[in-house]
Amino acid sequence: MTFEEAVLATDIVADCLRLGLQALGSDSAKLVVAHTRDIDGSVDIDSCLQEQQPNAPRWDYVLGYRKHIFYVEVHPATTGHLDTMRRKLEWLRSWRRGTKLQALVNQSTEHWIVVGRTTISKGALHTRRLTALGLGIPVRSLDLDKTIQTHSER
C-alpha cells in the first residue's frame, strides 16, 4: 500500500490529501527535500480533524516521500512543552492505529520541528525523555533524504 492509497482509504482524512507539500503551507519551508517531485502528498491532520476532535492534542502533518512516511509536528521547543509533545505523540499513535496508515508504520518516523526559541538541550535528561518517547531532539529543519538514510541504516 502506498501513502496516497492509505490516506484515500482513511475516510476521515481522505478529502484532506494535498499535492506535494501544499498541506504544510508556510511550514513546508522547514523541510529540506532533494526531489520535490517524489513527494506523494501531504495532509494537515490538525486542521482536518479539528471539527471532529476539537479538544484532542492533534499532531500537525503527515506526508509521504520516497516510500517513507513523515509525521511532523511544528511546535515550540521549551522544556515546558515536553509533556504536551508526549500527549500529542500518544494521540498520533492511537489515532493512526485506526487508519490505513498503520499498515505503513514500519516506513514511518515522527519528528518535532522547532518554532521560535528553544530551551531543550542535548543534555542527558531531555535526551532520555525524548528517546523514551521515541522522538529525537527537536530540529529547526528536517532533511527528508538524510532521515530516510538514517532510518534505513537502523
Image (cartoon, helix red, strand yellow):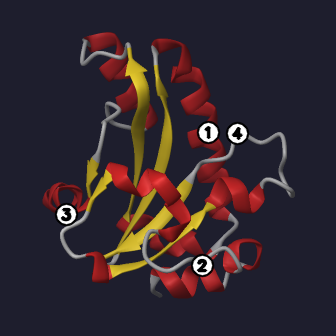
Q: Which residue is mark 1?
A: 88
Q: Which residue is mark 3?
A: 145
- Residue 108: image location, x then y, percent: 40, 62
Mark before the other along the chain sequence, 2 or 1:
2
Mark before the other along the chain sequence, 1 or 3:
1
Residue at x 57% of width, y 67% of height: 43
Q: Which mark is residue 57?
A: 4
Disc 1 secondary structure class: helix
Disc 3 secondary structure class: helix
Q: Real-space Cα distance between discs 1 and 3?
A: 25 Å
Q: Real-space Cα distance between discs 2 and 1?
A: 20 Å
- Residue 35: image location, x then y, percent: 21, 76
Q: Which mark is residue 7?
A: 2
Above or below for 45 versus 40 = above
Label 4 crowd bin: few (<14), some (14–19), many (20+), radius 10 Å: some
Residue type (three-letter) at the residue carrying disc 2: Val
Residue type (three-letter) at the residue carrying disc 4: Pro
The reply to whether callout 4 and callout 3 are in contact (CB within 8 Å) is no
Q: Real-space Cα distance between discs 4 and 2?
A: 20 Å
Label 3 crowd bin: few (<14), some (14–19), many (20+), radius 10 Å: some
Is residue 129 something that shows in the picture? no
Residue at x 36% of width, y 17% of height: 120
